[in-house]
Amino acid sequence: MLNRYIGDRAFYRRVMGVAVPIVIQNAISSFVSLLDNIMVGQVGQLQMSGVSIVNQLMFIFMLCIFGANAGAGIFTAQFHGNNDDTGIRHTFRFKVMVCALLVAVWTAILLLADGPLIGLYLQGEGDPRDAAAILGYGKDYLKIMLWGLLPFALSNAYAGTLRETGQTVVPMVAGIVAVFVNLIFNYVFIFGHFGAPAMGASGAALATVISRFVELVIVAGWTHFHPKKCPFIKGAYRFMYVPGTLLGNIVRKGMPLLVNECLFATGVTVVNQCYSTCGLAVVPAMNISNTIWNLASVSYLAMGNSVGIIMGQMLGAGTAEAEVRDYNRKLCVLSTVAGAVFGGLCAAFGGPFPQLYNASQEVRTLATQLIVISSLMIPFNAYVHAAYFTLRSGGKTGITFLFDCGFMWGLLVPLAFILSRFTDIPIIPLYIICQCAEIVKSIVGYFMVKSGMWIQNLAK
């Protein structure tokens, strides 16, 4: 039984080779984001709320980028397993083109509808003057953040391709440098040190934009200066051509992922908006809770990415089905165990962490309760994430769409909307009910993975 769920040294060596650089990058990024969040929280609760709302909107954009690149990334990983550099080059071109298109669309949306979108989160009970101040801080923060959309999208295209082709260290280094640049400039611009003006929340946005450009310079520069290690980059921009057959396959397999990520992120945003109707104190409390949750979830998020990469490479190389299933089962177990460990650590810090913020006692108490509840769900989140990337690795993006987005819009969004709009249920029981819906999703994911429907070779 142990051999069925626990791998040997070769298994963990391979997994750690992929996962550890991603864990390190995500951990440092989340930790610096945590410090960034605390800095803004020190300025004031209203500014923190404005930043938190805008970041909800940015979350949708970021997941759209992830989804667009992930569709081509399925083919990239399998082409790498098949040693097909030309195929990788075509998928990289596709990523660059779709990223540029998405940046143009989202820039227009956020410029034209910034006020109404931010205002959706200011519907709860509270002082109207506070709501007006939050709206102003949010709009100022958003105007600066828009400059970082393009470098973020292109960095994701480069970094994703490098990871899918086995070069995991460079994106890690670029991410680490970027987050420390972000941290340093946060200190300078938020509080006005070294002669710089004290910009508050707008300073946090400026620091983020600078760090995005730094990350792009590092990851793109290294790729172009190492064509032997990255043969796909040779002639990548000579002409933006993708063969029609491959383009059709990427769109057919990748479009459900793009739509899924966009709708999933929108669903998360809608659910959070439903939470916000329980009062203005919910917005900063959710921001505090999500900050420490992001740090606690780095292990299973990295494991999920590792599942997708390793499974894609094994499928593309034509590995026997029995070995693929065995690897996947052990990866899912490892991801769930990691989620349980980090969930316990998250719960342990649920009490002292909110005290670091310049917020009311009501917000701090509510944040502690939200942290403990979400921590208990992290093992289920971990398994769901591993199952999602398993299904995606074989190109079953239609099934992935139903699994991820169908759950979000078929169960979670209606549940949150009905309870928040048609009952007087307080935020804590509302949050518990919505979080427990993840248990249903993990059970469905288990049976979908076990069926083996995802095992197919796309590189042929």
Image: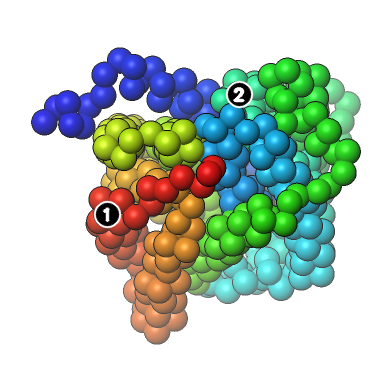
For residue 349, which quarter of the picture? top left
Residue 167: mark in rendering? 2
Q: Residue furthest front?
A: 460
Q: Nearer the viewer, residue 399 or 303?
A: 399
Measured as percent of width and height from the top left, residue 414 is found at 41, 76
In depth, the one of 6 and 364 nearer the eye is 6
Give the camera-side residue of 377 and 89: 89
Residue 448 lies, in percent from the top left, at: 30, 56
Residue 295 visible in image: no
Residue 100 seen in the figure: yes
> Which circle marks residue 451 in the picture?
1
- Residue that appears at 44% across and 81% down: 421
Q: Is residue 351 left or right of residue 312?
A: left
Vertical relation: 138 (above or below) 235: below
In this view of the protein, which residue sits in the foreground, 140 or 262? 262
Q: Residue at x 54, y 33 (%)?
A: 82
What's the residue type where badge 2 is placed?
Gln
Residue at 71% in and 47% down: 95
How packed mark 2 is, by other alpha carbons closer than 10 Å (few <14, some 14-19, many 20 or more), is some
Q: Is residue 7 above or below residue 79?
A: above
* Nearer the camera: disc 1 or disc 2: 1
